[in-house]
Image (cartoon, coloured by chain):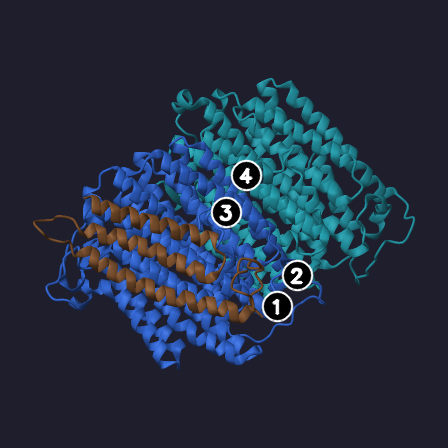
Chain colours: A blue, B cyan, C brown
Amino acid sequence: MTIFNSSAWIVAPIIIPLIGGLLCFLWRRDTFFIALFISLANLLSVTTLLRQFLLFGPLRYRMGGWEAPLGIALRLHGPALLMLLMTAVSGIGITLYARGYFSFRISALKHNNRHEQQERFFWPLWLMLWTALNALFLSGDIFNLYVTLELVSVSAAALAALSGKPASQIAAFRYLLVSLLGSLSYLLGVVFVYKTYGILDLEMLRQIATPGPGLQMALTLMTLGLLLKTALFPLHFWLPPAHANALAPVSAILSGLVVKGSFFILFTLWFEIFASSITANALDLIGLLGAGAVIWGSLQAIRQQRLKLLVTYSTVAQLGYLFIAFPLTATENISQEVWTAVTFMVMAHSFAKTAMFMAAGTIFLQVGHDRIRDLAGIRKSLPITSFAYAIAGVNLIGLPPSGGFIGKWLLLTAALTSGQWHWSLVIIAGSLLASVYVFRVVSRLFLTPDEAIIQECRPHSPLQEWPALFLAIIALLLGLIAPYFSLILETTEIVANLAPGGGL
Amino acid sequence: MTWQGWLLICILLSSFLPGVIIFSLPEDKYRFRTSLNICGAVIKIIFILIMNVGIYYGHSFELRLPLIQGMELILNADPLSALFTTLSSVLWLLTTIYAVGYLEDSPNRSHFFGYFSLCVTVTIGIALAGNLLTFLLFYEMLTMTTYPLIIHRGTPQALRAGRNYLIYTMSGGAVFLFAIVWLQSITGPLDFSAAGFSPRLLDTHRTALIFIFILLIAGVGVKGALVPLHGWLPQAMVAPAPVSALLHAVAVVKAGAFGIIRIILYVYGIDNISSLHLYSFLIAISSVTIIWGSIRALQQNDLKRLLAFSTVSQISYITLGMSMADQPLAIIGGLVHLVHQGLMKITLFFCAGNLAETLGIHKISEMKGVARRMPLTMTAFTIGALGMIGIPPTVGFVSKWYLGLGALALGNWWVLLILAVSSLLNAGYFLPIIITAWFGKQEAHWPEERRFNRFETRLMLLLPPLFTAFVVIAAGIIANAEISPLAWVKFIIREYGL
Amino acid sequence: MLTNNLYNLCGLLLFGMGLFALFACSHLLRKILAVNIMSSGVFLVLIATAYRPLGAGEIDPVPHAMVLTGIVVSVSVTALALILACRVQETSNHSLSQSERNTNDGDSEE
């Protein structure tokens, strides 16, 4: 079993999708099977990493044996591992769903060529995006984080433009520009960090970072850039058009995974690397914006007439919760719980939102529109999809035992034990608003329709329905496997600091 | 895991699995679905009886699933859980039989029975919950599983009722969640087995604890239909009759009342409530609910709406009993009413359903002389109604007797007055119905008459109310026997340590 | 030290100009150029940090590596942005200048 103990495995989640992406690009046939194989291989590599993590604790790896700052350092700590797992599981679901989605479009709709072309470009782009996300989670220095951020932006923007409709082209263009702006702002921040400390490695920065004007400037720039990319209210303006106009699997990827990447960096910077330099005012400000996002996003979602836009605005709202967690970390003894809460909310939202977009996409394809008003009784023809939507909705509301519930419970506990009442009220209000926008749709879907309205159901493959249900149920049961997650999150001590002699 | 733990899981699975299977069944598998349903219900009752015997002989039934620091899911069967599970499972069996008959040729039955089974699973979960987190888990799931049943008919009216139900219950759930988290941030994790938190906390967190109590009661009071949180209940009457029976007697309202009992006896503990001076708050709110529900019932012409308001009033006897919790006799009255109200109310709803299904009667004004057409149904109805008024030897009398004794022992004349007035009001709205039905003269044709050979209505619709009506009298007569609900309630009180 | 600061200031000024242009210009090509100017600004600041007397006459090689990487990224991103801009023009028949309207209709699929 020694082969499974090699610390070089940490590179596998980056290399495997990369190879897959290139193969898909060059091969052009059987791309789905390549992607499926890659998804499974990626899951295997992440599981191996999980095993190593449980045996040896957090890992560090220097690519090619080069030392920092020129070498590229990778590191695997608890949150990163969970993000990798999340991406691996969601990724399998997305891969399966995308196959069902494209084959349905190719077989059932006009313009076959266009859809075939879309599918051909989808696979390499999706695997490249996956590569970039895995690299982002594993990156151990702040400049590499910039590179991975850009890789994510490029592949995400290309995916967003895939549908070929004018609206989606424009949205994708704007999405790309906003991403670039965010990345550049982040890069400028990195420059300031380098000016101040001459170091890029995250672990070393954590040890030597002290509050100062240079760091302040750097943090502000990086934070602004990352907030823009994470679409925190009021910087969310670009998100609804980009996510709502994309193809359904792409929307699922963008909402479920991509925004989590930049949030992950932000959270790492604020609470791990530069924790000592964060002021209470900054935390409160972020929390306030988060509260604004929860309220504004939910109200917008309630107002929408179209399913995909509703789901998109709910993303804006749900991202707000992640930021409400910021001011709650201010109290010393509960910050660990807030970490756990945020991880849960990120994972639950990722699974649930992916499932929700898949369900919305299937409904769109079957019915031909997504006007919420006219969706009565879809349950009759698409029972599995409707259930998936409902279960994902339960997650967004945060009803037990979903992962979202665990997150909200922990946040509420943190807010109440630290005496920060106002945040708890926002959390509760957000849940209620979420139940309004979720049930607005669910009550339509589950309506018992008159025989006349029942939609003719075109034949479709199970791949269009089951992945969504599968992900939604994972999100729902996330709460029940919570002990394992806290185990992973609480393993912080670096047991093995292995630098291999040779390279890979 | 011990056999006790497995038994708890089996109790939950015995209705969960049939529910899931039923969802996937095609609509026309009528026979398989029905037998699956009934088998599940019977198996559940057998498991629960085994559990009851175990509890009686002092076995402890517990299952713990730690989630993360400070969060644990606990299933724990104590005598009180046994009371509620037995009630729910028996009434569920009857309601299932009734529903099979009632929905014989209506569409979407697999959908309906699927949720029906999930709903009872969740209710049993509420009964078995061993701490507030687990209670909340099932309490919210109850909302999710009952909502599709309420909007089952899909009419605009049903949708409106469903929306209101959601507004009330989701808000209630949010308040409840908030209160639980707040409480636990003060007291730390609480198990129901502890029967109340440490009184030392009262010195430091007095005001907060009073607020939390009010929030908790408001949270469960939505489902328990405490005035002014009862608005959803009369509207939800648009649902089919078995669903109404389920809402009123088996699951939702009962879950609310059960939550109130849990909070008072097992979360706060009777001593803490008495030192926080919260009993007068409880007495006030339950008295208002009792009187208001009865007055509104007096004004109704629609039979099901009348029954709904009568539920609002009757369910609050349980709260009334709890609000005199420093007197064991009053607690006995309140707890036993949990069972008694369920039996009486389900009888009434079955009968109302029969009238609607067989003759198309929905209004009281249409009931003139109906007893001659449907004598058995109206006999059952009369027994249920007399029980509601509290006439011996029905079970309703037993509950009121103990409540009255408790109030007397406390010297609380005001409560006695409330009991008397409410009985009068009950008589005021039930007696006219009984008199019209038996002695009125049929004026016009029944709105939509359907004929069934041999019996006045379908046999599956007739047997359940007759059975429950029989129990309403029988349990009243043998109230002092070893196996009556009253005896079990006394066992609960002994175990609780009073 | 003065030269160094001058470079820094110039870099920041470029970044600011680009930022302004990004929001002020509605023409897609100008927006792409604005982003390019911004990145040039950042690279300028980054290169200026290389002049840091580590020892006698030594120059820090790390910023060079970073700028090289950054240029590669910037070139490829610009290429993608240009393609997208062309596509916007082709598919929507819509002159490059009026890009900001009608993006919010959510009606993307068949």
Q: Amino acid at mark 2?
A: Asp
Q: Chain of mark 4?
A: B
Closer mark to the observer between disc 1 and disc 3? 1
Query: Chain ID for label 1?
Result: A
Residue located at (64% from left, 43% from top): B343
Q: Nearer the viewer, mark 2 or mark 4?
A: 2
Instruction: Determine which of the numbered discs, if any, sits on residue A367 in the image.
Output: 1
Task: Indicate the amino acid at tag 3.
Answer: Phe
Pinpoint residue B333: horizontal percent, then vertical percent.
Answer: 59, 31
Does any portion of residue C72 appear in the rendered image? yes
For label 2, the residue is A374
Q: CA distance from mark 2 to mark 1?
A: 9 Å
Disc 2 or 1, which lies upstream in sequence?
A: 1
Marks 2 & 1, CB-CB < 8 Å contact: yes
| Tag 4 residue | B258
Dot 3 lies on which element? helix
The residue indicated by pointer 3 is B138
Label 4 or label 3, whichever comes before in sequence order: 3
In space, the residues marked 4 and 3 are separated at their CA atoms by 13 Å
Do the residues at pointers 4 and 3 share their chain? yes
Chain assignment, label 3: B
Relative vertical location of residue C52 with respect to residue B189 in this rendering, above or below: below
Q: CA distance from mark 2 to mark 4?
A: 40 Å
The answer to which of B27 and A405 lies nearer the viewer is A405
